[in-house]
Image: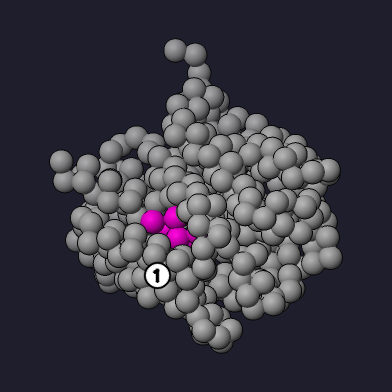
């Protein structure tokens, strides 16, 4: 019963993170209008947020040696509660940037610690459940996008209300662990296979961040979408992603992680071709929907594989502390991908976002060779064998 309660609490934390993040990113065109921000300036602000998220993740990794991830997760949620009302109700551009900076740090802390908690719960269950946690993030994103659509005619300040969600979540019963002090991430961690899995995660976050950060702007500025409907770049993307993540465990058991990732890479490339060439906004929305389905399970499979690799050959007493430390560092791949997706897409596409989305369209094909790194273990078959 306690384990189930912790699983629900961690899922709620993922949901909260997705809801807040998507609620903010789907309003980027509104913030652009309010503060007269160009695409290039917005790219620089996103660069700042991503770099500070990386700082937050590093801080979480460092503190995980002496503090349990449940405590760190509550800290990140508390920072989110502070940052969101500040940036959504900011009276000046300077206050807006300050709130965005605090939110960036909070984003990194929560990203790292939710995944620390998730891999610990998955290990306790003894079976793959990471896709369902990331599905909770996606469900939160769907709610956030729906809120943007529902409140598109209301003042921007109403977005401050989403801070109530992380406030409620931070009191939930996350999974505790006995803290064992580690001087550093152990030197015998097999970084080569972790690097290959991490590169796949870089590709995922490049595509995912490009879609979620620039999708609404693309619809607003490139394909003449009616006012109030720009969040449709994100909502169908997330719905398709949720559907695939909810079925992700079954897909992986039936077809193997390697095949699932390779098929997803091809679907994603085709979807980005549709987006880049879209003659109208409904066609672009179709492309974003297919893209959500294509990349859906890459992130949860990456964290699951990283936890498995980091925990191999380690006694149970020290396994979770070691995995927490490794996941905190592994989470940095998230921000490398986010830099490519948010900053490079905006910088290349500052005059035409079609060019910006051509970057992930090509680079997503790197998942085809990287998929083999997700094979269960050395010497085991990549694909499932007949019963």
Q: Is residue 125 magenta?
A: no
285 or 204: which is nearer to us?
285
* Residue 254 to residue 190: above or below: above
Q: Is residue 63 left or right of residue 105?
A: left
Which image quarter holds the N terminus? top left
* Residue 147 to residue 65: above or below: above
State the image coordinates of residue 239 (x, y, percent, origin top left).
53, 39
Secondary element at image label 1? helix
107 or 334: which is nearer to us?
107
Q: Main secondary structure of the magenta part?
A: helix
- Residue at the extreme top: 387
Image point (73%, 61%), residue name: 345
Q: Quadrant of residue 50?
A: bottom right
State the image coordinates of residue 221 (x, y, percent, origin top left).
76, 59
Residue 240 visible in image: yes
160 or 191: which is nearer to us?
160
Q: Quadrant of residue 308?
A: top left
Residue extent of the magenta highlight:
16-23
- Residue at the extreme left: 1
State the image coordinates of residue 375 (x, y, percent, origin top left).
53, 36
Q: Is residue 129 left or right of residue 87?
A: left
State the image coordinates of residue 315 (x, y, percent, origin top left).
27, 50
Q: Quadrant of residue 64?
A: bottom left
**Label 1 crowding class (10 Å Cα cut-off): few <14, some 14-19, many 20+?**
many
Q: Is residue 308 left or right of residue 375?
A: left
Image point (79%, 67%), residue name: 350
Residue 326 visible in image: no
- Residue at the extreme front: 153
Q: Which residue is mark 1?
A: 80
């Amino acid at each position: 019963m306690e384990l189930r309660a912790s699983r629900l609490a961690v899922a709620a934390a993922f949901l909260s993170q997705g809801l807040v993040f998507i609620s903010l990113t789907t309003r980027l065109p509104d913030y652009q209008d309010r503060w007269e921000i160009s695409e290039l300036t917005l790219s620089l602000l996103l660069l700042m947020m991503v770099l500070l998220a990386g700082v937050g993740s590093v801080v979480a990794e460092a503190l995980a040696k002496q503090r349990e991830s449940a405590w760190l997760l509550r800290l990140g949620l508390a920072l989110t509660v502070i940052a969101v009302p500040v940036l959504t109700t900011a009276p000046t551009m300077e206050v807006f940037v300050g709130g965005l900076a605090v939110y960036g740090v909070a984003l990194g802390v929560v990203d790292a610690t939710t995944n620390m908690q998730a891999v610990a719960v998955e290990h306790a269950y003894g079976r793959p459940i990471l896709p369902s946690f990331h599905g909770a993030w996606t469900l939160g994103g769907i709610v956030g996008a729906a809120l943007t659509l529902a409140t598109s005619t209301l003042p921007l300040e109403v977005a401050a209300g989403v801070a109530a969600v992380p406030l409620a979540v931070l009191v939930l019963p996350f999974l505790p662990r006995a803290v064992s002090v580690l001087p550093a991430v152990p030197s015998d961690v097999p970084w080569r296979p972790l690097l290959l899995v991490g590169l796949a995660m870089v590709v995922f976050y490049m595509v995912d961040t490009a879609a979620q950060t620039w999708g609404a702007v693309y619809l607003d500025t490139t394909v003449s979408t009616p006012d109030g409907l720009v969040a449709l770049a994100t909502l169908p993307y997330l719905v398709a992603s949720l559907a695939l993540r909810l079925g992700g465990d079954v897909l992986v058991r039936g077809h193997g992680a390697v095949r699932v990732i390779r098929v997803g890479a091809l679907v994603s490339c085709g979807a980005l071709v549709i987006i880049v060439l879209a003659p109208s906004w409904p066609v672009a929305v179709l492309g974003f929907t297919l893209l959500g389905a294509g990349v859906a399970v890459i992130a949860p499979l990456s964290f699951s594989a990283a936890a498995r690799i980091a925990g191999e050959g380690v006694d149970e007493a020290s396994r979770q502390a070691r995995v927490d430390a490794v996941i905190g560092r592994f989470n940095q791949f998230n921000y490398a991908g986010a830099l490519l997706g948010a900053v490079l897409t905006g910088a290349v596409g500052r005059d035409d976002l079609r060019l910006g989305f051509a970057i992930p369209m090509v680079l997503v094909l790197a998942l085809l060779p990287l998929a083999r790194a997700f094979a269960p273990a050395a010497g085991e078959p990549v694909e499932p064998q007949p019963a």
